Structures are given as C-alpha cells and as structure tokens.
Image (cartoon, grey):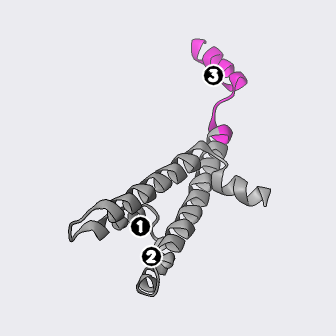
C-alpha cells in the first residue's frame, strides 16, 4: 500500500496536480449546486479535462449515475498523478546520469588552459 501511495503522491508535481484536481472538482460541484442557469453542468467539464484520458472511460456511464462521474475523476487523477511521478523520477534520474561531475569539469578546464 505504501508503494502505491508513493507512486501516486510521491513527488511535489503529483501532489500539486492532485490538489488542482480536488480544487476544480469542489468548484465544479459548488457551481452545479448553486448556479441557476441552463449551462451549470458545464462546470463538470473542467475536472474531466484535467483527468483525461482515463476519466473518459467512465463518461458513457454518467447517464446511469453521477457516481460514475466521480469515479472517472478519481481514476483519471490517480493514473495521471502516477504518470507525472514516473516522469518526474525519470527526468531526475536522467539529469543525475548526464550531469558533469566535478572531476570531469576540472579535467576539461585544465586541458582548455594548455
């Protein structure tokens, strides 16, 4: 369980993403419940866009129950957060392996002076 949580919220980029998803979902829910206009349901598009493409898998089931809309948001957010964390780790690993070391820099600068 700890490994799964680490993959979903193990880096600051995935935590910021999850916070953005929670914030837009709360905003969309508030907007739908308080807005009297005919286009109030359009607020639910924003969290769906943030959690695409995984959230689109549940979209056909929304007509059955709105609970599937929330399931789509949650599944999409967790999948995307894990992907963001994986990319963040990969970029960090690549940056560490390709960064010049201090001994390489001193050898290069000594050779350039001669």
Q: Nearer the viewer, mark 2 or mark 3?
A: 2
Please name the residue shown 57% across and 57% down the image. 81
Distance from the alpha carbon under mark 2 to that under mark 3: 53 Å
State whether the magenta stretch is mostly helix, strand or loop. helix
Q: Where is residue 4 drawn, in percent x and y? A: 73, 60
Please name the residue shown 65% across and 48% down the image. 89
Location of mark 1 (residue):
48
Please tell me in which quadrant of the rendered image residue 41 appears: bottom left
Q: Dots 2 and 1: beta carbons under 8 Å?
A: yes
Residues 5 and 102: in front is 5
22 relative position to 35: left or right: right
Please name the residue shown 23% across and 69% down the image. 39
Please tell me in which quadrant of the rendered image residue 114 appears: top right
Q: Dots 2 and 3: beta carbons under 8 Å?
A: no
The outermost residue toward the bottom is 64
88 w.r.t. 34: above or below = above
Location of mark 3 (residue):
108
Callout 3 secondary element: helix
44 relative position to 58: left or right: left
Location of mark 2 (residue):
56
Question: Residues in magenta?
Answer: 96-114
**Residue 31 falls inside the magenta stretch:** no
């Amino acid at each position: 369980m700890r490994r799964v949580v680490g993959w979903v919220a193990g880096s600051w980029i995935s935590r910021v993403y999850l916070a953005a998803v929670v914030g837009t979902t709360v905003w969309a829910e508030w907007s739908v419940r308080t807005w009297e206009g005919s286009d109030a349901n359009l607020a639910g598009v924003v969290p769906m866009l943030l959690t695409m493409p995984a959230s689109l898998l549940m979209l056909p089931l929304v007509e059955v129950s709105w609970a599937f809309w929330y399931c789509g948001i949650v599944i999409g957010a967790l999948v995307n957060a894990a992907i963001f964390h994986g990319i963040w780790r990969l970029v960090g690993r690549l940056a560490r392996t390709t960064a010049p070391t201090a001994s390489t820099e001193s050898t290069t600068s000594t050779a350039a002076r001669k």
